Amino acid sequence: MTSAFAQQTGPIRLNQHYFEIAAEDSTNHFFDKLVSYSSDSTMLERIFARDGKVHRVVITKPPKEEYHERVTDQYNEYNELEWRKTENLNNKKFLTLYYFDNKVVGQVLSDSSALYHVARNGETEPTQQNFNDFEPQIVGPLVEWHEFIFNNFHLSAKIRTETVETFWIAILVNEHGMVDRIEWANLLEGNPKIAAAYMRAVERWGNNFLPALDSFEQPVAKWLMIPFRIDRTMKGTSKPIRVYNDFI
């Protein structure tokens, strides 16, 4: 398959959350990414662990009307497929299949941001639910999370922005639902002081999370990725920037 692709970049250094890092950042260097393109503009991203083993392969096809397909394959250290996610980037609908011993043992189908069809090992029919428990979950209604973050996100009035900036905050929720670590994932984007203020608000939220469940319904430690955006406010308002919680 790769012979039809022409490599366009040299290795891109990534952190453990798959975001690009500075060339001199050895502390956060977990992966290397190679990007190639086919003649029809399909993009192939191959992500390698530091030992050279393939860790993740992402194929993104050119958009076609209402469908823009991206397929992500994740491999374990034994080069076995762990999961495959097929998603439509136009509407965020996706299907993720989870594998064990080269067999599908779990799946989650998303019809929308509030409806999921989940099946695990031994289940013949998926369960319809309004959350994806293959990922860590925030305890309580999301409106309470949004209100809490808004009320606890404090910035100096001197901090301003002229453009929209997107931040990704990574929260490692262990198998007991406790927070083991909070990190700013996309280190090369945005103001560090804004990211630090958001992380302080997340810390105040405490351990109000539910752990992710694997394909056998066992709790596992997993990173929860939370995006937020900031933008400039209108002149005369009380705060220098506006904050948008993109986590839904």
Image (spheres, helix red, strand yellow):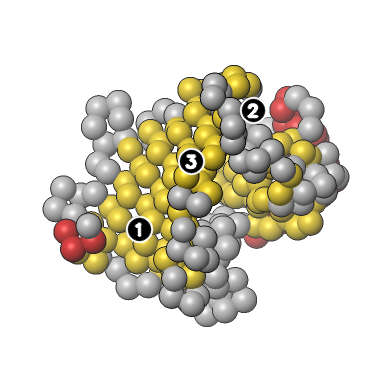
Residue 241 sits in which quadrant? top right
Callout 1 environment at 10 Å: few (<14), some (14 to 19), or many (20+)? some
Q: Mark 3 points at which residue?
A: 104
Q: Is residue 96 left or right of residue 245?
A: left
Q: Residue placed at 41% from the left, 36% from the top?
A: 87
Q: Which residue is label 2 attached to? A: 131
- Badge 3 density bin: few <14, some 14–19, many ≥20, Cα 10 Å: some
- Find the distance from the CA under tag 1 to the CA under tag 2: 29 Å
When the figure is inspected, residue 124 is found, relative to residue 1, above or below; the finding is above
Spot occupied by residue 183 in the image (x, y as percentages of width and height): 69, 58
Q: Is mark 1 on a helix, strand or loop?
A: strand
Residue type at mark 2? Phe
Asked if residue 157 shows in the view, the reply is no
First reached walking from the N terminus: tag 2 or tag 3: 3
User: Which amino acid type is shown beneath numbered disc 3?
Assistant: Val
Q: Name the residue under label 1.
A: 45
Residue type beneath disc 1 = Glu
Q: Residue at x 71, y 52 (%)?
A: 221
Q: Does residue 53 appear left or right of residue 211 in this picture? A: left
Rounded to the nearest angstrom, the CA distance separating label 2 from label 3 is: 21 Å
The spot of residue 103 in percent (x, y) is 47, 45
* Vertical placement of residue 44 versus 86, above or below: below
Q: Where is residue 197 in the image (x, y as percent from the top left)?
A: 74, 51
